[in-house]
Image (cartoon, rainbow, N blue to C red):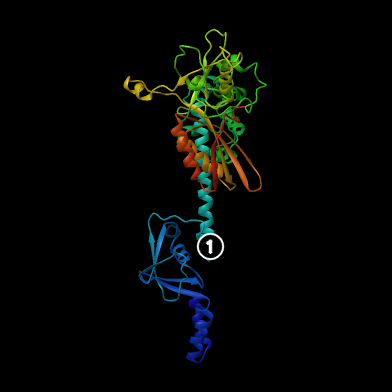
Amino acid sequence: PWLSSIKEWQQDTVCSRDFVDCVRRELLGRRVFVFLRNGKILNLARGATAVDAAFQIHTEVGLQMHGVEINGKPVPISYKLKNGDVVSILTGEGRPTTEWMRFAKSRSTRSKLRAYFRSKQHDSVRRSGEIIFFDYLERHENVIRESSYLEYDFEVPRNAKELSPFLPGRSHFNDVDELLFAIGKSHNHNFLRTKLSKIFLVPLKVLEASDESPLVNITRKAYASQVAENKHISVRDEIVDESVQISDAVLPDGEAVEYADAECACRSCLPVRGDAIVGTRGVNVADAPTIVHRLECPYAQQALNAVRSSSAHGDDVIGHPVKLVWSDEEASWEEGKINSETFLAEIAVMANDRKLLLADCSVVASKNSEILKTGSSSNAEHCTLEFLVRVSDLQELQELMDKLREVHSVMSVERRFGSELLE
C-alpha cells in the first residue's frame, strides 16, 4: 500500500521538493523502516520496538527471541526502532515474559503474546490436573480395580495415553486434555471422585470411603483406647514448658527405651522422623500400643505432668509416658532393610492471592512429597493454602517448605501442629 501511495503522490506533485516533503510528512512521519541482515525491509508503525520487529518477521522468531542487536550492537528488547536501523534478532532458548506486553506497540504483536500466555496458562492448569488425577489413581488403584463395574479386566492407567481408551465412559469428556484441565481448574476432590466414578464405574460412596480410610484410620484403633473418653481436653490445656525433656520426668525404675512406630503416630500433633518425641501407653490395657507424640503435644505433657505429680502410672486416660527414639536408619541399611516409613504433616501457605497460585504450589508439593489432601481459604487480597502431605522425615519436610517459599507471591510457609484437614 505504501508503494501505491508514493506513486500517487509522484503523479499529483509537480515539484520534486514538494514530492520529498510529502513522502517525509505522510509516510515517514507515521512509519519506521528498518533493515534485516539479509536486506529485507520491515515497515513498522512509529514507536515500534524490537519486540514488534521480531514478531513481524515470524511468530516463532518472536517467541524464541532472547536478545537484539541494532547496527551490530546489543540493545534491550524495549529499544524503539529508528529509520535505517539494521535489526538482528537473536533466537534460541528465549521465552516471552509478561513484561513484553509493555514493549509491544503493534496490535498484532500483543495479540500473539496474549495467545502465547493463554496457552501457557492452560498447560500449567492441565499439568496440575494431571498430577492430581494420577496421584489419586495410584493411591486408590486396588479399590478402583476391585469395585469397578466395567465388564472387562483392566489395568489402572498411569498416564494420559493409557487413560484415553477409558473415555468418555459416563463422564462426557471425550478428550483427556479437557478432562485433566477441568480437574486442575476445579481443584475439588468431590469433582475428581465424581469423574473417576463415571469413567471406571466405581460407586461414589466406595471412593469416598477409600479417601477417608488411609487418613482417618491411621491411628484410630491404637488411639481410641486412650483418647475416646478424653474429648474434653483442649489442645491448649496442660501445656508445660516445651524445653522439658522426657529424661527430666521421674519414670518407673527400669523404664526401657523403645523404637517409635510410625503407624501409631498421634493425630493431634503428627510427629515426623527427626522430631523430639515421647510415647504414651494406656494403663491397665492389655497389649496397648505406644502412641508416638511430639514432645510439646498436650497429651504427652499431660502424661509427663501426671508422673511429676507422683502418680506411679501416669494419667489414667492418656497413659504413662514412655521413652522413645526413632529407629536407626543407618543400622537398617547395614542389615539390608529399607526403611519405608512415611509420616503425615500439614503445611499452611500464606500468600498474596493470584491466578494459578494453587496450581503452582501443588506442582511444587507433588514433586517433593505425596499430596493426600488440599484446602484453601481467601479474602480480598490474601489466601491460605493447606496441604496434607506424606514425607519420609523432617529434612524432606523442611526441603518441601523451602521450595514452597520460592513460589511467586508466597509470603510464609508454616508446619501445622496436628491437622485441620484430617478432621
Mark 1 Cα shell of 10 Å, populated few (<14), some (14-19), many (≥20) = few
> For this rendering, which residue is in front, 147 or 74?
74
Q: Is 372 on the left-hand or right-hand side of 335?
A: right
Q: Is residue 276 above or below residue 363?
A: above
Place of residue 239 in the rendered image (x, y in percent of width and height, measured from the top left): 60, 27
Q: Residue at x 57, y 45 (%)?
A: 351
**Quadrant showing the C terminus:** top right
- Residue position for label 1: 102
Q: Which of the 4 image quadrants contains residue 284? A: top right
Q: Which of the 4 image quadrants contains residue 220? A: top right
> For this rendering, which residue is in front, 28 or 363?
363
Q: Amino acid at mark 1?
A: Arg
Place of residue 339 in the rendered image (x, y in percent of width and height, measured from the top left): 40, 23
Place of residue 274 in the rendered image (x, y in percent of width and height, measured from the top left): 45, 28
Q: Residue at x 50, y 43 (%)?
A: 405
> For this rendering, which residue is in front, 341 or 109?
341
Q: Is residue 33 above or below residue 128?
A: below
